[in-house]
Amino acid sequence: MTDKFETYKRAIARILDSAGATRGTGFLVSSQYIFTCTHVIEQVLGISCSGDLPETEIELEFPFNSPCLQQRAKVIFWKPNYNFLKALEGIDIALLELCTPLPSDVKPIPVAKEKTQWNDDFRVLGFPEGYDLRGDWAKGKILGEQAGGWLQLHAEISILPGYSGAPVWDEQKQGVVGMMTRSDVEHRKADAISIQALANTWKQQGQLIRLLNPHFVSSKRIIEEAYRACRPSGWQSEFPTTLADCVFDLSEMPTGENNCSRIVEFASKLVPAFPSLFENLKKWAKNAFQIEQQEFDRLCDRAVLTQKQPTTQSYLFIFVRSNETSDRYNLEAGILMEEDERSSVTRYQTLTVNLPPLSRSQLATLEPKLLTDILEQSRQLTQGKLQIECFLPYTLLDLAIDRWKRDDEYDEPFPLSEEYPVVVRILERLGYSKPYLKNQEWREKWKCLQQNACCFEILACCDRAREKVAEDLERGYIGLRRKTIVPPASEPGGMFSIIMKEGIPVTLWSRQDIDSCGEAERYEQLLKVSVVELPNRLKAIRNATPRKDETHIGHHLSLLWDNPYRVPPDAPSFRSNSL
């Protein structure tokens, strides 16, 4: 065997759970960092990667060294093994940092300098059951590349659990070409993440984390401020709490000004605070994103000159609650105030609503003076942007709240939705009467809005049979859209039933038949926008709608925009949320 192959073997790690049982494999990618699969870490710790990064240290061993090297490592980065939005397997990668250095003669795995080719021979060492101490070799043929950074392999024997995270050695290229992730035992097939995908993760995200990690604890606020300055308006994910979360979130964002990656923009904003990192960050930008040094210098200069000013963002909550002693409804209101639209710091204030219980017909044509009074209270408490979110009982979800009007001192009353984004929320999801059983699905679907997809890609068409809608949701769609008249929410089995049963956070529907009133083209154009723009885009459409044109689409669209991370502080299902 060659020296390269010996280096390869010595870089292989066996990953153990707390009981000392082998759960998978990993390998050294630099002197201090190890790649493995996210699902291996999930099995080791018994947790899901949808939560925060674990603080528990991972035990591992390097068995091809004499004596066997025992180490501990912490998780600093992981990517999920399932992309919910596109219903495709994502990049199943976890990056570990060793707690203590390895001996200097233990080197990172040798990487193949050329791309693997069809029918190349491979071998891989894993630690399946029965071989969890000494390991077991498997070999076969590389069938070729797949879309999304994957390699398809065909093994001579079945690849069993225990090989996940193992580096795949290409005999012809004399180097590692991928990382084993999953297998089809029956057909002796397996999939590996290509070394190119791993290299991109390491170069673009891992190395930046490595540079910033020593500064994070002492300069957390500075790093968080740089992240917030790069966060686009309307970005739907939670605010990250760790450095790795910041970097991961930035990598998912669309490019910023001048088509610049948000991660590079983020790094440039850190230079004034960390001048000692300037040269290293410049090299990182060049290596990972091919950003020339002159361009990075320009970004750093602009970061100093153009500090983004904070903009306050507030949310007026209007609650419609069933009256306990009649078939009428009580109205309540409160204002949620963010000190900065890029910040997670919020305040909440209950507003005064002096009104007797209302019937459904009275709710449909709410008195403009009442809404004007509520708005005046909110404006006394906050300035800046305002969005109106109305929490309706399930049976009233078809209520046309966007047609509610406010007084105008110099003109006739006009719809609130012409001045502010107005969206529907679902009262039952807050858990005041009983827990909402689809909370987890609701949260997971909402997180997928950060993918910034257009409405066509993310909202399943609900003008078809329910079975077809279910197929779309199974494929990864997270919301609904409908252009024909929706049956009342009180009728079972319709669109509103699907919303509740599937934890749907976003739905766009019309209260008239779009095609029959000649608005199909305008509707199709709306579906081409990014889903995160919907509230503000609808507000713009409503504002431009002629008030006397009753067939115009702007008079008849409703939007469910149900953010599980923006709720009143007393909501029973969310009392652990920080507001």
Image (tube, rainbow, N blue to C red):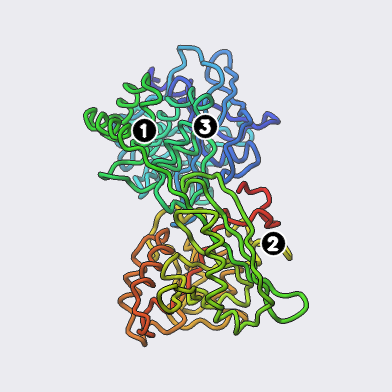
Asked whether residue 189 appears in the rendered view, the answer is: no
Q: Quadrant of residue 525?
A: bottom left
Q: Residue 269 got which mark? A: 1
Tell me the amino acid under the disc marked 1: Lys
- At a point 57% along the width and 25% down the height, the residue shown is 73
Asked whether residue 102 appears in the rendered view, the answer is: yes
- Mark 3–mark 1 Cα distance, whole angstroms, equals 22 Å
Q: Residue 76 got which mark? A: 3
Nearer to us: label 2 or label 3 = 2
- At a point 56% along the width and 66% down the height, the residue shown is 374
- At a point 65% along the width and 61% down the height, the residue shown is 430
Q: Are marks 1 and 2 in contact (CB under 8 Å)?
A: no
Residue denoted by label 2: 431
Query: Residue 300: percent from the left, percent from the top?
Result: 30, 31
Tell me which numbered mark, 2 or 3, is placed earlier along the sequence. Answer: 3
- At a point 53% along the width and 68% down the height, the residue shown is 424
Tell me which numbered mark, 1 or 2, is placed earlier along the sequence. Answer: 1
Tell me which numbered mark, 3 or 1, is placed earlier along the sequence. Answer: 3
Nearer to us: label 1 or label 2 = 1
Q: Check disc 3: other Cα within 10 Å, few if <14, some if 14-19, many if 20+.
A: many
Q: Are marks 2 and 3 in contact (CB under 8 Å)?
A: no
